[in-house]
Image (cartoon, rainbow, N blue to C red):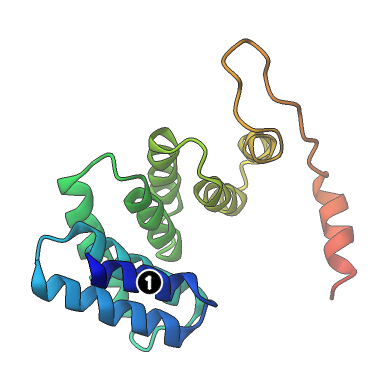
Amino acid sequence: IDLVIRGRNSIARTISASNRAIAIDYFHRALQRDSRCRDAKLGIAGALVGNLLDGWSGEPAADSLRAEQLLTQILHEDADNALGHTYMGMLRRLQGRLNDAKSAFEVAITRAPNSVATIGQYAITLLFLGIQRQLAKVFDRLVHGPDDGAGHPPGVVQLPQEHQVLKILGRFQ
């Protein structure tokens, strides 16, 4: 468990390829001690997906395959693992499998409804899918929090219309 904690600490430092490489090394060492260590597998998968997202993977096809194998294994062992579903959603989005990514994030959100990171990743996926109505609900949840269960729904966030977004983006070209 000490190696897993060291791996997590390496990931928590400034995001960089070298810190992720150090973390992966710690997680691999933890797996050498206990091949069933789910936290080490999750750590490796998360670091690999992060490297793929950031363009830091030296072997994208191999890293994608390794992350997928680990995540499939983790989710087979623990279908309620919210972080595993979140990483799978991120991986699926990278693979261009947007509907599968959306499904993975939806499962993750049911397991961890207050995970801002998961909700944010879900919102990015919805943006890629072009689902403005669902995206508005996600942003609403980020801004106002979940329904309090007492019949007081969160506030409403108005997203700009497409022409307004294009006008704003045009300023940065």
Quadrant the N terminus occupies: bottom left
Q: Is residue 28 left or right of residue 145?
A: left
User: Quarter of the image holding residue 93?
Assistant: bottom left
Task: Check disc 1 and report the residue beneath it.
Answer: 47
Looking at the picture, how far across and down is residue 61, in whole percent? 31, 79
At x 90% / y 69%, what residue is drawn? 171
Q: Is residue 119 left or right of residue 7?
A: right
Looking at the picture, how far across and down is residue 43, in whole percent? 31, 66
Q: Is residue 96 above or below residue 147?
A: below
User: Quarter of the image holding residue 60?
Assistant: bottom left
Q: How many marks?
A: 1
149 or 159: nearer the eye?
Answer: 149
Element type at marker 1? helix
Q: Is residue 155 visible?
A: yes
Looking at the picture, how far across and down is residue 18, in whole percent? 43, 88
* Label 1 neighbour load within 10 Å: few <14, some 14-19, many 20+: many
Looking at the picture, how far across and down is residue 166, in whole percent? 83, 58
Q: Is residue 62 visible?
A: no
Quadrant the C terminus occupies: bottom right
110 or 10: nearer the eye?
Answer: 10
160 or 85: nearer the eye?
Answer: 85
Q: Is residue 130 left or right of residue 33?
A: right
User: Quarter of the image holding residue 36?
Assistant: bottom left
At x 40% / y 83%, what residue is drawn? 57
Kind of residue sitting beneath label 1: Ala
Q: Is residue 130 above or below residue 25?
A: above
* Furthest residue toward front: 2
